[in-house]
Amino acid sequence: MVDWTDTEKSTISAVWGKVDINEVGPLALGRFRCSCNDRVLIVYPWTQRYFGSFGDVSTPAAIMGNPKVAAHGKVVCGALDNAVKNMGNILATYKSLSETHANKLFVDPENVRVLADVLTIVVAAKFGASFTPEIQATWQKFMKVVFAAMGSRYF
């Protein structure tokens, strides 16, 4: 799917190695307050329709207080962890996950791209100045590959 340079692989691994899954996943979906206001379920309210079984996700306060939202954020980060560990074949790693999102959950693949963007924003906010433009470019390349793999079963 993509050839990674050694520098790209080590950069992605280094960034991911500093990410606290218990914090970043929930932040990306909107669980806790932080200086970054970009949260998928809050900023992109149409994504709430996929979380009907999570209880109340109708307001920012409800989303930020919802433990199921936080738990799902951790699940998302677990999937990213698999991608980092399998950078050589992210497409195969995500085959089943893509199939489920496309054919069982009917998640619009654009929402995966939105989540990838929000995760990048949350990671950048957590890292601050150490998330240099070079690191961000590598991270965004990684997220685009993840997005492409997640969308592979839609077409």
Image: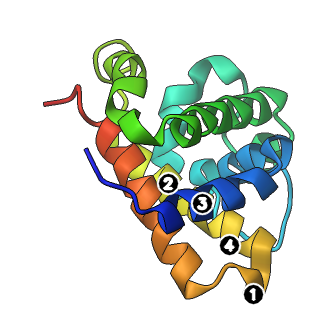
- For residue 72, side relative to residue 133 (left or right): right
* Other residues around mark 4 within 10 Å, as few (<14) / some (14–19) / many (≥20): some
Q: Quadrant of residue 148?
A: top left
Amino acid of disc 3 = Ser
Sequence order check: which comes first, mark 3 or mark 1? 3
Q: Is residue 109 above or below residue 43?
A: above
Q: Are marks 2 and 1 in contact (CB under 8 Å)?
A: no
Whole-angstrom CA distance, mark 4 to mark 1, is 8 Å
Sequence order check: which comes first, mark 3 or mark 2? 3
**Is residue 94 shown to the viewer in this render?**
no
In this rendered view, identify the residue nearer to me: 142 or 119. 142
The residue identified by callout 1 is: 129
In this rendered view, identify the residue nearer to me: 85 or 129. 85
Amino acid of disc 2 = Ala
The residue identified by callout 4 is: 124
* Other residues around mark 3 within 10 Å, as few (<14) / some (14–19) / many (≥20): few
Q: Are marks 3 and 2 in contact (CB under 8 Å)?
A: no
The residue identified by callout 2 is: 116
Q: Is residue 141 above or below residue 69?
A: below
Residue 44 picture location, percent across and down: 51, 55
Sequence order check: which comes first, mark 2 or mark 1? 2
Whole-angstrom CA distance, mark 2 to mark 4, is 12 Å
- Under circle 2, the secondary element is helix
The residue identified by callout 3 is: 10
Sequence order check: which comes first, mark 4 or mark 1? 4
- Under circle 3, the secondary element is helix
- Under circle 1, the secondary element is helix
- For residue 147, side relative to residue 50 (left or right): left
Q: Residue at x 82, y 74 (%)?
A: 35
* Other residues around mark 2 within 10 Å, as few (<14) / some (14–19) / many (≥20): many
